[in-house]
Image: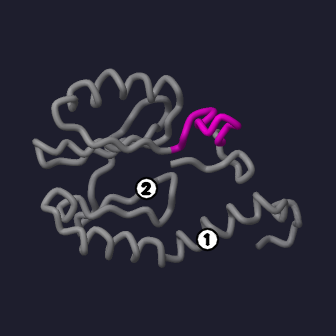
Amino acid sequence: MIIDTACGGRSYIGVDGYVEGAPELVAEVAASSATKDLYDKKRAYRRNGIQEYIVWQVFESTVSWFSLQDGEYVELTPNADGIIQSQVFPGLWLDVSALVTGNMQQVLGVLQTGLNSGEHQKFVAELHKFATGDRFSGNGE
């Protein structure tokens, strides 16, 4: 996932249709490549400044969600409800247990709750302000 440079992000879709610059979040589904995804790719993503990195390890029935903090990845842990919340995309919530057990209705329900949250609404408003240039209006909104 990216936040376009027009909205304050560090990447954009180039004329050739490919992402230019580092996306804010990369998510992968790993089966036999889990070791590669968790080590080699993780180092490459850290080096390139990917802010969040998610690996769903299918055979292990686990999800690892990392946040880049002070140049190192820190694994995010689920809250008391079993939900991991993105640090970069407020409102992007994942019910890990529901995902690994295949309860997609629950996964989508939790995601929708996150998208309806005040923190997500504020995030969207900030992106809109950035994209339209309103961030310099000085009105404090």
Left or right relative to 108: residue 139:
right
* 121 with respect to 140 (left or right): left
Q: Give percent across and percent down for residue 47.
A: 49, 23
Q: Position of residue 141 (x, y in %)?
A: 76, 73
Magenta span includes 93? no
Measure the C-alpha gap from mark 1 to mark 2: 14 Å
Which residue corresponds to mark 2?
Answer: 86
Q: Residue at x 22, y 29 (%)?
A: 33
Percent coordinates x, y for residue 53 in the rendering:
39, 41
Q: What amino acid does circle 2 point to?
A: Ser
Residue found 42% across the figure and 71% down from its top: 114
Tell me where residue 109 sits by quadrant: bottom left
Count of picture labels: 2
Which of 30 and 15 lies nearest the eye of the viewer?
A: 15
Disc 2 element: loop
Q: Which secondary structure class fits the magenta region best? A: loop
Residue type at mark 1 is Lys
- Residue of label 1: 122
Residue stretch in magenta: 12-24
Check the image and name the residue furthest to the front: 16
Would you identify the image quadrant in which residue 134 lies?
bottom right
Give the structural element (helix, strand or loop) at label 1: helix
- The relative height of residue 110 versus residue 30 in the rendered view (above or below) is below
Image-based side of 69 in relation to 19, left or right: left
N-terminal of the two: label 1 or label 2? 2
Q: Is residue 21 magenta?
A: yes
Residue 20 placed where, x, y %? 63, 33
